[in-house]
């Protein structure tokens, strides 16, 4: 016997729950199937447990995709202010940290509770610990077999995310299902992920725990935030940001002293020739980092005793220090997944697949990846909203 609904949502994460709530409140009979024992597990660990639930500046320029225009429609129709209004309607206190990033004052559990309350308003059925074993499309309906039970609906929403953070139960199931229905998948890869160092750069691992405000760049993308040295390589917000743009074999360039005038070292030599080069660096950078850079540059002693040519070369190197990462820390440490179900297969208005009417894909399962700082949550809300209006 098959239990029928108007729509089945696979995945009880941010996008899946929000889509189900919105559709349910539009009068649709909606079922959410979640394979974990509880919904919203990634929400609970986000933002250090306080959930960076959106970013006030979210726009299409903050997202990576094979089609950079795809996200515009959904993001324009459901904005950060729209989600913030919902948060405030539920009495959730929030604060802006930096760069438009909004966090709960309390706990990420508040966002999960809010989504569950919204689902309850729409009379959504949520079943956890349900492993989907088979999906078929026959006689105009999608039939989903999960944990020994059959469920049917005219609409099916893929909201199972990507394989980042597998310890939370994340898998690439969305891509398997997409391929089953003949949809193209842009190769998934870890994004917002620490980079690992090898070769000569291994020496920088000794700086584990040291951080500094830098400009980090990779493939024309540049971010001004903190970089952190780790026992495996590079991390911190600036590195996580550029990791989404980085490809194997590419360099990552760091400006350790952003904003300094072009000939600042030569000016320092003129003004304070007895100042030690290493001392000058220590004034601008953490001591351990300053000492390491000075050693790598091979410069020591008073500025007045160092040739202008050597100081110019040091300036250039400090502003364009090149690292050659040998990889990333993989999906295990990636906050999100870049790539996914190709946007060429989807309507940007409704998130419905063009080849299989009634089949939709939203959130991280789609080839739309946001920057660090609440952007991926905003894509979850916006893509879910677009889908829910069409169900």
Image (tube, helix red, strand yellow):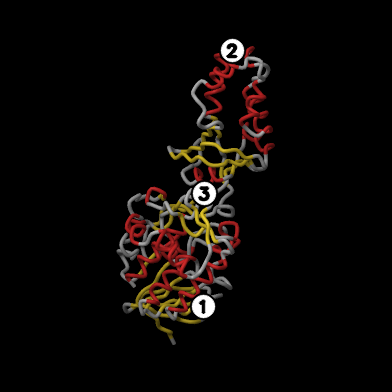
In the image, what residue occupies the spot 34% across and 57% down?
A: 76
Where residue 195 sits: x, y (%)?
A: 57, 43
In the image, what residue occupies the spot 43% across and 84% down?
A: 3
Q: Secondary structure at mark 3?
A: loop
Depth check: 326 or 292 in front? 292
Depth check, mark 3 against mark 2: the one in front is 3
Mark 1 or mark 2: whose residue is earlier in sequence: 1
Q: Quadrant of the N terminus?
A: bottom left
Depth check: 272 or 185 in front? 272
Q: Dot 2 surroundings within 10 Å: few (below 14), some, or many (20 or more)?
A: few
Residue 322 image-quadrant placement: top right
- 352 is higher (above) or lower (below) than 129: above
How many dots with numbers? 3
Q: Give the residue pinned by disc 2.
A: 307
Residue 156 image-quadrant placement: bottom left
Q: Tag on residue 151?
A: none
In the image, what residue occupies the spot 55% across and 14% down?
A: 309
Mark 1 or mark 3: whose residue is earlier in sequence: 3
Mark 3 or mark 2: whose residue is earlier in sequence: 3
Where residue 37 sits: x, y (%)?
A: 58, 73
Q: Dot 1 surroundings within 10 Å: few (below 14), some, or many (20 or more)?
A: some
Where residue 154 sits: x, y (%)?
A: 35, 77
Q: Give the residue pinned by disc 1.
A: 127
- 303 is higher (above) or lower (below) than 43: above
Do the residues under discs 1 and 2 have CB atoms within 8 angstroms? Answer: no
- 250 is higher (above) or lower (below) than 36: above
Judge from the rendering whether residue 252 lies leftward or rightward of residue 386; answer left or right: right
Q: Dot 3 surroundings within 10 Å: few (below 14), some, or many (20 or more)?
A: few
């Amino acid at each position: 016997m098959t239990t029928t609904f108007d729509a089945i949502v696979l995945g009880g994460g941010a996008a899946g729950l929000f889509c189900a709530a919105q559709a349910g409140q539009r009068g649709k009979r909606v079922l959410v199937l979640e394979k974990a024992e509880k919904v919203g597990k990634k929400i609970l660990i986000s933002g250090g447990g306080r959930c960076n639930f959106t970013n006030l500046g979210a726009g299409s320029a903050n997202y990576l995709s094979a089609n950079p225009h795809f996200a515009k429609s959904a993001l324009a129709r459901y904005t950060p202010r729209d989600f913030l209004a919902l948060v405030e309607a539920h009495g959730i206190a929030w604060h802006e940290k930096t760069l438009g990033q909004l966090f709960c004052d309390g706990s990420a559990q508040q966002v999960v509770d809010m989504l569950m309350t919204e689902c309850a308003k729409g009379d959504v059925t949520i079943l956890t610990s349900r492993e989907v074993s088979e999906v078929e499309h026959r006689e105009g309906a999608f039939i989903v077999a999960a944990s020994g039970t059959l469920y049917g609906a005219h609409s099916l929403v893929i909201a199972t995310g990507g394989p980042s953070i597998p310890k939370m139960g994340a898998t690439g199931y969305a891509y398997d299902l997409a391929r089953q229905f003949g949809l193209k998948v842009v190769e998934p890869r870890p994004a917002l992920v620490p980079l690992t160092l090898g070769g000569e750069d291994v020496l920088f691992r000794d700086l584990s725990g040291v951080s500094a405000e830098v400009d980090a760049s990779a493939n024309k993308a540049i971010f001004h935030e903190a970089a952190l040295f780790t026992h495996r390589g590079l991390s911190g917000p600036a590195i996580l940001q550029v990791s989404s743009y980085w490809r194997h074999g590419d360099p990552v360039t760091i400006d350790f002293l952003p904003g300094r005038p072009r000939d600042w070292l030569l000016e320092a030599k003129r003004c304070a020739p007895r100042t030690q080069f290493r001392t000058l660096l220590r004034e601008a950078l953490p001591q351990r980092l300053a000492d390491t850079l000075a050693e790598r540059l091979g410069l020591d002693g008073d500025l007045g005793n160092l040739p202008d040519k050597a100081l110019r070369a040091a300036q250039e190197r400090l502003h364009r220090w090149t690292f050659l990462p040998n990889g990333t820390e993989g999906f295990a440490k990636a906050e999100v997944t870049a790539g996914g179900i190709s946007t060429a297969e989807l309507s940007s208005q409704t998130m419905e697949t063009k080849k299989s009417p009634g089949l939709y894909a939203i959130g991280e399962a789609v080839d739309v990846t946001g920057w660090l700082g609440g952007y991926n949550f905003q894509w979850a809300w916006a893509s879910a909203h677009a889908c829910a209006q069409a169900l």
